[in-house]
Amino acid sequence: MADDKKAEISVTVFPGDVGGITANVNRWRSQLGLQSATEDEIVHSSQKIKVGADDGLKFSLTSADQKKGTLALLIPKKDATWFCKLTGD
């Protein structure tokens, strides 16, 4: 990438809800140096999406210095949760 900027993408699936939406989003916020958000703040910051036939949530997070960001999808499917996460400069 230009100017030595980097990005990482991951797709993971875990059984159950893996701690719930609030815990997962706050973990991503922490990775960007952001303070934890309340459940209400997280719900209001999410965007409903469709991935195939499945409903999911999209989260777009940016560090306070605007230098790093995360775009994450959280898709509950059957008895598991799929996470698609892009993080980079």
Image (cartoon, rainbow, N blue to C red):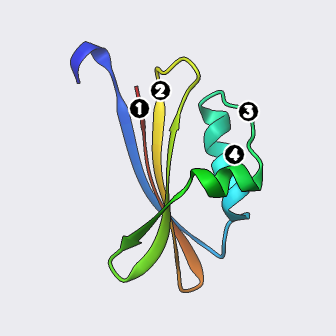
Q: Secondary structure at mark 1?
A: strand
Q: Is residue 37 above or below residue 7?
A: below
Amino acid type, residue under disc 4 in the picture? Asn
Amino acid type, residue under disc 1 in the picture? Gly
Report, in whole angstroms, how far the alpha carbon at label 4 lies from the one at label 2: 16 Å
Label at residue 68 = 2
Q: Residues within 10 Å of mark 3 (few under 14, many from 20)?
A: few
Q: Which of disc 1 and disc 4 is earlier in sequence?
A: 4
* Pointer 4 with pointer 1, Cβ within 8 A: no
Farthest residue in the top direction?
3
* Pointer 4 with pointer 2, Cβ within 8 A: no
Farthest residue in the left direction?
2
State which mark lies toward you, 4 or 1.
4
Amino acid type, residue under disc 2 in the picture? Lys
Q: Which of disc 4 and disc 3 is earlier in sequence?
A: 4
Q: Position of residue 88 (x, y in %)?
A: 41, 32
Q: Is residue 50 left or right of residue 16?
A: left
Q: Which of disc 3 and disc 1 is earlier in sequence?
A: 3
Report, in whole angstroms, how far the alpha carbon at label 4 lies from the one at label 1: 17 Å
Q: Which of disc 2 and disc 1 is earlier in sequence?
A: 2
Label at residue 35 = 3
The residue lying at 67 percent from left, 45 percent from top is 27
Name the residue beneath numbered marker 4.
Answer: 26
State which mark lies toward you, 1 or 3.
3
Q: Is residue 85 above or below residue 14?
A: above
Q: Secondary structure at mark 2?
A: loop
The residue lying at 36 percent from left, 83 percent from top is 53
Q: Is residue 86 above or below residue 77?
A: above
Q: Is residue 48 left or right of residue 31?
A: left
Q: Which of disc 2 and disc 3 is earlier in sequence?
A: 3
Label at residue 88 = 1
Report, in whole angstroms, how far the alpha carbon at label 3 lies from the one at label 4: 8 Å
